[in-house]
Image (spheres, coloured by chain):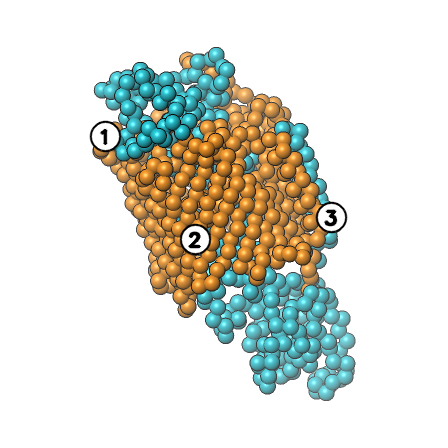
Chain colours: A cyan, B orange
Amino acid sequence: MNRHLVLVVAAALSAACSATESKPEARRDPPFVFPHSPHVEGDVDCLECHASITKAKALENRVRHVQLPKKSETCSGCHDAVPKLQIPPRTRDAGLNFNHAAHLDRLKGEKNACVRCHTALPEQKGTQYDAPSMNACTSCHNHAKDFAAARCLGCHQDLKRYEKPVESFKHQGEFLKLHGGLARGGAESCASCHEQTFCADCHSATTVPGKPSFVYPEDVKRDFIHRGDYQSRHVMDVQANPASCRKCHGSAFCTTCHEQQNLVQPPGSTTLPRNLHPIGWGTDKTSGNFHGDAARQNIVSCAGCHDQGAASLCVQCHQVGGFAGVSPHPKSWKKTDADRSKNSMCAACHH
Amino acid sequence: MVTSARLAASALLLATTVAARADVVEGSSTTMISAGQQLRGTEAGQLPDLVKVATVFEMIRVSAREVRNPLFQDLEISFSGWGSGDLQDVRWDAGTTGKLTGDVTTAYVRGTLAKGTVQLRAGREFVAAGAGRMLQLDGGDVFLRLPAGFTVSAFGGVPVAQRFSSRDTTRSWNPAGGDLAWGGRIGWNMALAGVAGRGLDLGVSLVNVSNDSDPVRQDLGVDFRLQPINLLTFVGNATYSLYAERLAEFNVTALISATRALTLNLDVRHYSPDLFLAANSILSVFTDTNRTDYGGGIRYQFTKAVNASLDYHLLIEPGKVVDTTETGGEGVARVEWSSSGAVAGGEVAYLKTGDTGYTSLRGYGRKTFGKLFVAGDLTDVLFKQDVNGQGSSLVGSLSGGYQLARSLSLVVAGRAGVTPYYEQQADFMVKLVYNSVVRVREVK
């Protein structure tokens, strides 16, 4: 198996290398060279320089829609000569489906209509461009239903590119407590932003290399489960909320460690396991330590060591005709004889 | 097993090829060395052995989005996996007895059709919808968005086993285990215009897992989310075991966003622990006890930099005598301060269950200095009953990192402490992290 897993890792490395070497990273944007604010204040129409935007039906890649006028009365009102500016290339990817032409068509006749959305314009030496916020869209468009149903891809090409969700989807307050319940009904909404590799950090107990706080010790702020000395606390946590453990961990996960601590006898081993159970555990129902009472209180704790199918320790006494001599099933047990003949688990005791 | 590994390798090689045509490619590689000591139990009456464990890990993530293809919109290929080599003793959670091991965490292809109304995914994935309980699966799923607010999803496959080594429920680390899983969810949502998020979501789901034809899970689930007004949200779900013919769990939470700074939540949780064991486990037939928790929490954002929260639940547990109950409790109080490049916080956690429990105190902080960061946390746990003859545990960690290059960072971390099982404990870790995001589509 290991030979093949090495192959898997090698292939993954190959994938990572090809992904990073085959294409250069997007360059940092150079500083802006045009002072927008004095021109807006001077009532210069945006279209004097951005004329082609009126025909732009999409935010096309590699198209900037900037053309400074070569000779213009607008410029000569303030400038003796039209300044020769070298417009630097931008590398920003908008990631939106947006039709400038349709929007400007509706705003025909309105002077500097662009400013209705483009409230913050870039200035000289600035490197950050403040694109119109989503409020600019929702001030006219009522997307409440799309928003509620997380139908975002009509406008957004991809939500994963955003470092943080938009304001109304920000995971603030008690989101961590709620996220499981919300995902039950809206997993596809989660997938709009998050790949499952993100979920796997915490939810893939079967296949990850270690618990999250082991892999990311520097992320002290995140609410990782099982931080610190969990070895000493886990017995208490499984008593407080046994179902929580079983949502991620099968019995064999617990047994893996318990065998190494010699609490469970590994298959084929001749070393007797250490017995942590108190006096009276086996048969003394009056001791206050009887195993049947403990099992009724928290059967999941038993499963941490004694869940080996038909080979489980319980079967030795509780099988029909066995030493225990009484039915171990609770009052609510409803299975019929027909079920027993078909089910290998039942057959372990009901021969 | 071998077939699975070959399939995974083939999928990765395919991903490599396809990534070259993707518009957004993200890659991450983490090389990590950790060293420390672990316990190995010996015969009764003897002290356990301490063994040295030193492991080299390589963790890889690659995802390619907007992969150009003639069929799907927004085609996405995602992979995460890891390999490791134990240089000395094999660590306790290696999953094999060999020193070289590794696993595929997620590996799937996802695409949408018909303007996002059809979504298909295949590979190693999770089932989160309905009663899925984040079932990790080698298989596929389909999601359909139908008219009038209806949605339908369905999945099928094999529950994931660690290191491709066991599908059997009694040997798999996956709580479902088994060799076949299938199910789905039918949902309906009614969005109410006016406030983002306002509306009603309802769902009915089914999860069926079997192992060699024996039932492992046969669960029918219902879930809902109701936000009648902006400041009030109810979220709830219930799962009924069709096999045991009993309620496995129900959870209801009311979240009240009283102001922008103040949120409150009230919860009720009820569950039967035996129905979270695999139905083909011998232990699943011995008990039918229930547990119920009632509680709530409050969170207040004092300033932009400071927030505090308090959470408490009363635990109603089965008593030592049949048909009686005992009460316990769990709570967490936390205060956190954060500012640009710095965070500091403290929390007190409390647990009382049966005759045992603990109180833990934790402090943590992180500060960034340009390309350098330092982070640390310290946790002290005071046990209600001695653990291995000791009444407390104290563990702390200190981490530091430096951004070597634009996408390359080095992290060094150490952990030390005194616990009931270790008179002195120290672990050390060095991590080299490479992250890269490549966007092919650019606006110039």
Question: Label 3 amino acid?
Answer: Glu
Does B197 sit left or right of A296 as displayed? right
- The answer to which image quadrant residue B413 occupies is top right
Where residue B322 is drawn, which disc sits there?
1
Callout 2 secondary element: strand
Q: Say which residue appears at 38% left-offset and 47% top-offset.
A: B221
How far separated are the C-alphas under marks 1 and 3? Answer: 66 Å
Identify the residue position indicated by label 3 in the image: A21
Indicate the amino acid at tag 1. Answer: Val
Label 2, label 3: how many angstroms apart (C-alpha)?
Answer: 44 Å
Tell me if residue A22 can be seen: yes
Pointers 2 and 3 within a single chain:
no
Viewer-nearest of discs 2 and 3: 2
The residue shown at (35%, 30%) is A338
Q: Is residue A213 visible?
A: no
Crowding at dot 3, Cα within 10 Å, few <14 / some 14-19 / many 20+, comes out as: few
Give the x, y percent position of residue B147: 47, 63
Q: Position of residue B91 (x, y in %)?
A: 55, 26
Q: Which residue is mark 2?
A: B186
